Amino acid sequence: MKEPSSLAARKATERILEISRLPVYRNRHTTLLTDLYQLTMMYGHFCAGRHQQRVVFDMFYRSNPCNNGFVIAAGLEQVVWYLQHVRFSEEDLEYLRSLHLFGDDFIEALRHFHFTGDLYAVPEGTIVFPNEPLLRFEGPIFEVQLIESAVLTFVNHQSLIATKAQRIVDAAKVNPVAPNAPVIEMGLRRAQNLDAAVFGSRAAYIGGCTSTSNVLAGQSFDIPVAGTQGHSWIQSFPSELEAFRAYARTFPDATVLLVDTYDVLNSGVPNAIIVGHELRKEGRSLKAIRIDSGDLAYLSKRARQMLDAAGLTDCGIVASSDLDEWTIRELALQGAQITSYGVGTSLITSNNCPALGGVYKLVAHEMNGKLEPCIKVSENPSKVTNPGKKKVLRLLKDGMAVADLIALDDEELNPEQPLTLFHPIHTYKRKTIVHYEIEELLQPIVIQGELVYTLPRLPEIRKRVEDGLCRFSSETLRHLNPHEYHVDLSQPLWDLKQRLLHELRG
Amino acid sequence: MKEPSSLAARKATERILEISRLPVYRNRHTTLLTDLYQLTMMYGHFCAGRHQQRVVFDMFYRSNPCNNGFVIAAGLEQVVWYLQHVRFSEEDLEYLRSLHLFGDDFIEALRHFHFTGDLYAVPEGTIVFPNEPLLRFEGPIFEVQLIESAVLTFVNHQSLIATKAQRIVDAAKVNPVAPNAPVIEMGLRRAQNLDAAVFGSRAAYIGGCTSTSNVLAGQSFDIPVAGTQGHSWIQSFPSELEAFRAYARTFPDATVLLVDTYDVLNSGVPNAIIVGHELRKEGRSLKAIRIDSGDLAYLSKRARQMLDAAGLTDCGIVASSDLDEWTIRELALQGAQITSYGVGTSLITSNNCPALGGVYKLVAHEMNGKLEPCIKVSENPSKVTNPGKKKVLRLLKDGMAVADLIALDDEELNPEQPLTLFHPIHTYKRKTIVHYEIEELLQPIVIQGELVYTLPRLPEIRKRVEDGLCRFSSETLRHLNPHEYHVDLSQPLWDLKQRLLHELRG
């Protein structure tokens, strides 16, 4: 690694070195995590002598997952880690040679591969909308092409799970007995393999979960870990009461008892109450019971009555069992007496929409030594790309987001002058704003291959989510049929897009 | 590692060492990939002095994903790799200490942790059904408890994707122009992070896909890799024709041209035909065109006509664009002229059912020095477990599977004596068979901590899937409303289950 060229770069480098030592990143070699067509295209450019052609690619998505009104951007840390480590090993080169697709000179060129370009990106935890560039790469096509697949994988996955988590956490806020009831992420066993579990846990924490059951995620990212006992604990003792007592002896200050192994109301809760009273004699208290099956509304209400009648009014009720944002809302509407939720499958897989369809599109390329904007057309108008090197501006009035504006990178806006916004398709829809504030969403992350951005820790990213959400109306944030937030194109960008479209079709 | 105790163990060890050197496994440390409650339970057992209690756990699932009639078991290789490497590092112990949950003596005991138990499992590629033990662990509860989460994650994920892949590959078999049309797995960018992409690719290959776009999966598992060019290749040239020519120059013997960047029928196909003719002059031929958007039925039929009229009758048509088993069937019904399919999101995420709900349940535990069967009851009868240490027998007549029988491990069946099978819930449903063959599904994998099973390579696993599928009727294999295959309990197991249920409820 080269000596950092500035204090900012030095700080950024120290932080990424620290991240690279985390168990989930350490010693991993992922350079071949790419689609073969990236390599065949790179070889094609190489053979045509045009692999140093400078290009700009945007990463963006076209529609919100889960019918949500927005996405929480996440995964940048993993992208930066990847960019810092993307190097072809001898073994990689040997494998590529074995495919008999590529010439030796190309393989030699790969040996010296490293990323020398620029990356601008929205920080993790930023609220973003369809068609906004979340990452913008600029550099030789040889480099910017290879990284497409890994970048998409990391950002698509983590953004998806952060977004799904926020929906679930938001649903848990409305609760008759415990406003802002904590949501524990416990999806490990249903995750789509190890990384989905660990990076999914990270994303869930970004989205607002308070803890995870996943110890490796806890270790890797300093996320609080939570867990008590499973049914096998109860079964492995001669009786439920003995199992409860043994657990309380082991964790007298954090006793949560799983009450549904045999019969919640006739065995589990009565036995938990016995142990609760025993703990009280020692000056402690039963922290919570956990119900993991059955009718959670009915069982939690009956259990609450029994606990209260026994004087255990401060004992919480943890519920789990195929929960998602909708069942959590329904439980609240039914007056379920649940004080915290454990959510697994639906959260860790985003089960009703398990992929965010982020794409990576060429928007400018070098022609005669100059970056020229380019466009991809499609029969489907929503798939026509926005051309050129762009920025994303969030326009705010009185601290609230009014609209986002996708503009060309070299445009200057004067917030004291009236600005007329218009819908990029239904252009008659217009509104004029003045005296607004501008937040520029894309920030410099890597400049000429050098990391200049210090990756934040998770508490800071969570804070960014919370602060960001405050800037949008409840209509934009709601789970069902959210209001479509304005994402407009600047007049110069719109004009450019029309011109390129007409040139192509003309 | 100890010296292997037999030739089989030596061979098995050599193979797992080879696997451990694969890029996707190498240097990874995943001991803390567990739910915290496994560790709190272990600590509880440790404090109660019962952590050496011998137990048996079954891994099984309760219902088939995607309304399929069966599951293809996969993930055992990853489980074995994990079992061979599960050791607490100093860093792990330090982290656990930092949680202030566990005593020092427990942390010391973890330092010496390794798996000393037994594992019996169905080989990867076995066709399996709900409630059948796919893996059976036996050993000290201290060990068998820790590994639950990772085992479930690996087997749930890979079995899910193998099963989904088989549905898609099966749908592609029915094709008016190309029976058994190949299916290329190309889901990397939509996978739920890196492992989901790479192990998902492995599982897709087990399920019958012919290749993957994912180079790391190709390198790791020796899966054929496939890929040509993306839209950015076309866009980065002054014209589509120049882009096509440059690609054909680079890969003259494997030219596949993406024809939907501008206009499939008015630009893409005509330009591809020009290049096809140019290739022919050199004595080569255009291998295929690829259509990645739009109405695939209409476009493929029109493209076929145009290619045929131009004399390029041997040029294939690759289609991709949000395909799954249903769209592939519909395309075939419409006479679409597609010769191979690229499938991404729906395959790599199993999008309509992104989790297999495999569970891990205690079925026997040591009492007074003897293994005693135990049961978990539930308000939901389908969640009542099958008690005891068991085996799974597939009963065959004339090479076809008649029923599977879950029996106690020490039962002896005489295939020359009539056997009466009965439905475990609706017990009046009975049938008697005689002169049948028995295939015992659970095989010894690890005995007293020693690996005795040589993990097969992927071609062998694919063969097992193909051979296995031949043993079931088309009614069991169909995609919609499949026939429910008979999985019965032996009389002794059924009697044991009833006895334990009545004891518990009595």
Image (tube, coloured by chain):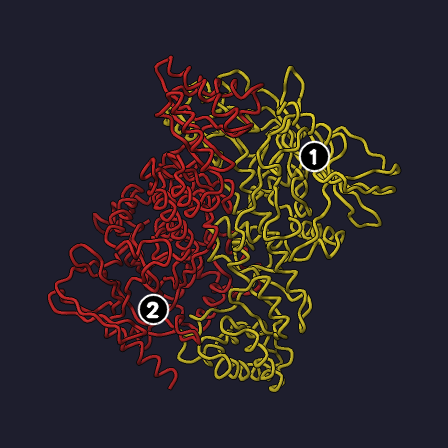
Chain colours: A yellow, B red
Q: Secondary structure at mark 2?
A: strand
Rendered view: B283 above or below B490: above
Q: Position of residue B301 (x, y in %)?
A: 42, 33
Left or right of B254, for residue A436: right
- The amino acid type, in three-letter code, at marker 2 is Arg
Give the x, y percent position of residue A162.
Answer: 61, 52
Q: Residue at x 20, y 70 (%)?
A: B431
Q: Residue furthest left?
A: B416
Label ID, residue A444: 1
User: Residue B141 at what x, y percent from top left?
Assistant: 38, 66
Residue B401 has which mark?
Answer: none
Residue lying at 62% horizontally and 75% vertically, measured from the top left: A337
Q: Is residue B424 left or right of residue A48?
A: left
Left or right, residue A471 beside residue A57: right
Secondary structure beneath dot 1 equals strand
Report the residue marked by disc 2.
B54
Q: Is residue B394 above or below residue B419?
A: above
Callout in the foreground (1, 2): 1
Quadrant of the rendering where the C terminus of chain B is positioned: bottom left
Q: Residue furthest top?
A: B281
Viewer-closest of A172 and B269: B269
Looking at the image, is A474 positioned above or below residue A100?
Answer: below
Q: Residue at x 54, y 28 (%)?
A: B263
Q: Amino acid at mark 1?
A: Pro
- Quadrant in the rendering for residue A445: top right
**So how many labels did they put on this image?**
2
Q: Nearer the viewer, residue A150 or B212?
A: B212
> How many C-alpha atoms fall within 10 Å of the one at disc 1: few (<14), some, or many (≥20)?
some
Q: Position of residue A161 (x, y in %)?
A: 58, 51
Q: Nearer the viewer, residue B111 or B101?
A: B101
Marks 1/2: CA distance?
57 Å
